[in-house]
Image: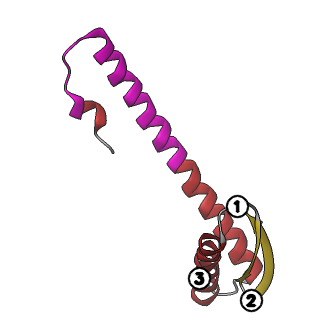
């Protein structure tokens, strides 16, 4: 069920309509807020707007990397399932190694 949760990020308070629940939404807001504030404090001439954009780009990069890892793992699972379906003996560990 959707609910409206008040959060504060980079000194700005606003409501988020979410199905994730208040606790999770507040946790996400705290993570983003902390990352933005750290960038502002650690980087010369970094405004909150620039820090927010950098955070968004970094979170997107992480998401893309995780999607790629998931796709690679799914491919390994498909190969392993195909081998098992054929009744061949194989070394499961070689398929499941994570780089």
Query: What secondary structure is the stretch in magenta mostly built from?
Result: helix
Provide the secondary structure element on which disc 1 rests.
Answer: loop
Quarter-of-image position of residue 30: bottom right
Which residue is at 63% across, 57% downward? 60
Mark 3 vs 1: CB contact within 8 A = no
Question: Which is more toward the observer, 81 or 2?
Answer: 2
Which mark is drawn over residue 11?
A: 2
Which mark is drawn over residue 19?
A: 1
Label 3, label 2: how many angstroms apart (C-alpha)? 11 Å
Q: Position of residue 88 (x, y in %)?
A: 22, 12
Question: Which is more toward the observer, 24 or 10?
Answer: 24
Quarter-of-image position of residue 21: bottom right
Which mark is drawn over residue 3?
A: none
Provide the secondary structure element on which disc 3 rests.
Answer: helix
Please give the range of residues in magenta.
66-93
Label 3, label 1: how many angstroms apart (C-alpha)? 23 Å
Q: What residue does disc 3 label?
A: 34
Q: Position of residue 5 (x, y in %)?
A: 74, 75
Q: How would you rate the neighbour count of disc 1 (Cα within 10 Å): few for under 14, some for 14-19, many for 20 or more? A: few
Q: Is residue 67 left or right of residue 2?
A: left
Q: Is residue 52 left or right of residue 77?
A: right
Q: Is residue 21 left or right of residue 85?
A: right
Does the magenta portion include 74? yes
Q: Position of residue 55 (x, y in %)?
A: 64, 70
Label 1, label 2: how many angstroms apart (C-alpha)? 24 Å
Provide the secondary structure element on which disc 2 rests.
Answer: loop
Q: Quadrant of the N terminus?
A: bottom right
In the image, residue 40 sits, relative to residue 23, either above or below, namely: below
Does the magenta portion include 2? no
């Amino acid at each position: 069920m959707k609910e409206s949760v008040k959060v504060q990020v980079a000194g700005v308070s606003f409501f988020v309509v979410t199905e994730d629940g208040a606790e999770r939404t507040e946790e996400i807001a705290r993570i983003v807020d902390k990352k933005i504030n750290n960038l502002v404090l650690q980087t010369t001439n970094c405004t909150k707007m620039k820090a927010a954009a950098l955070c968004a780009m970094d979170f997107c990069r992480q998401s893309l990397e995780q999607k790629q890892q998931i796709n690679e793992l799914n491919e390994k699972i498909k190969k392993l399932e195909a081998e098992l379906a054929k009744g061949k003996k194989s070394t499961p560990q070689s398929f499941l190694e994570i780089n």
